[in-house]
Image (cartoon, grey):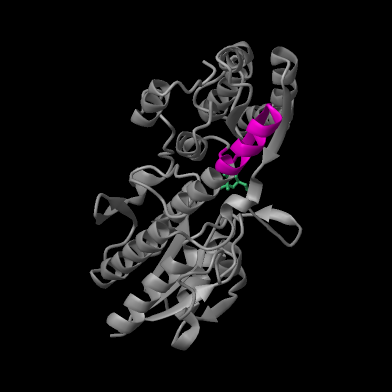
Amino acid sequence: MTKYIGILTAGGDSPGLNAAIRGVGKAAQGYYDMQMIGFMDGFRGLVDNRTTRLDGGVLSGILTQGGTILGTSRDKPHRMMFAGKKQDMTDVIVENYAANHLDALVCLGGGGTQKNALQLMEKGLNIITLPKTIDNDVGKTDTTFGFDTALGIATEAIDRLHSTAHSHHRIIVVEIMGHRAGWLALGAGIAGGADVILLPEIPYDIENVAEAIRTRVRSGKNFSIVAVAEGALPKDQAVLMRAAEARKAAAVEKKERKSAKKELEMLQAANSSHTVTLSQQLEALTGLESRVTILGHLQRGGTPSAADRLLATRLGTACADLIEQGEFGIMVAARGELAVPVPLQEVAGSKKLVPMDHPWVESARRVGTSFGD
Ligand code: F6P
């Protein structure tokens, strides 16, 4: 019997999504004789039942394309703006899954998508997911596709900033994506030879950052590159932020959770322009001129790297194998050279942050990089 599968991409886009759609689709349809349709714009398209055919030539020529041919959104099934208010749309999703005669639904996404996928699995749908995000913060997988491409872009940016910082004897503070996880800033900071790397996981003291730069000046290096993750925090702010997060996680009543969430949002908003503040503080504390470069969405755009195309194709084709074997309720994780199924219950909520003693951190310290701690 022919199997019918649906596929969608959710959350922030990531280079390699099209390679993954192609990997799943070509293996499922060309190799296993299944039929595959796409849902547009993440879970939103599943609610609206906006579908697109993914047969014939549609999957050809997309391997090298950035973004996602299916479109994406950050809509969550259980809390979606619909008819002017936030509603739980999971029952509509279950209906549309049945109306399309699906045997399985493939969801490509980051940490949030893994949680949403688990909820749909609990509603009885056959769900299988793939891990994508430039943040590399999905647990239970070695890595996620998108990360390698973004790492290359951010590293090249740091390389280019070096020569201008050097010529003008300036500090350049370069902001790299990652609100809660600092993998990208850490990886690009090391690969690009940043002098200071600031991460959400390692709160900094501005005096220590300034002293690292002054030490360089004393040794004749009157320029510095500071790679800072979006979510990096000074120590005092970090204490407040982590306390609010803990309160939100521990809240039993809705009212309590709402107030902790509000407090967290206020702290995040207050920290939103921290890179500019950091640059101004460093200028005042070191006497060097300082400039800010925010890499932003450049890091998510354009052609995926060879490593991401390879990873997305490996995980995508393994996904089709697992559907054929009838394995659901899982994420297809990268483990060394293998692609292994991991139960969604284990994946959901298992955010992978940078451990303080991670080998990358240790290695950076050995070459004299300051974390401002
Ligand atoms: O989750 C991936 C990510 O790129 C984060 O690193 C970044 O903070 C966020 O998305 C930006 O989101 P948006 O594209 O919605 O502005």
**Viewer-proximal residue among 156 and 218:** 218
Residue plotted at (56% across, 77% down): 51
Residue 225 in magenta?
A: no
Judging depth in this view, the residue of 280 and 212 nearest the camera is 212
Residue situated in front as seen by the camera: 230 or 38: 230
Query: Which region shows up in magenta?
Result: 158-178
Image: 97 above or below 295: below
Question: In front: 241, or 176?
Answer: 176
**367 shown above or below 141:** above
Q: How far across and down, in percent of the image, does residue 302 sit?
A: 57, 61
Instruction: Work out whether 73 lies above or below 288.
Output: below
| Quadrant for the N terminus in the image | bottom left
Q: Is residue 166 magenta?
A: yes
Horizontally, is 272 left or right of 67 in the view? Answer: right
Residue 258 seen from this side: no
Taking the spot 45% from the left edge, 42% from the top edge, the residue there is 137
Percent x, y for residue 33? 31, 84
When asked about the image quadrant of residue 106, the answer is bottom left
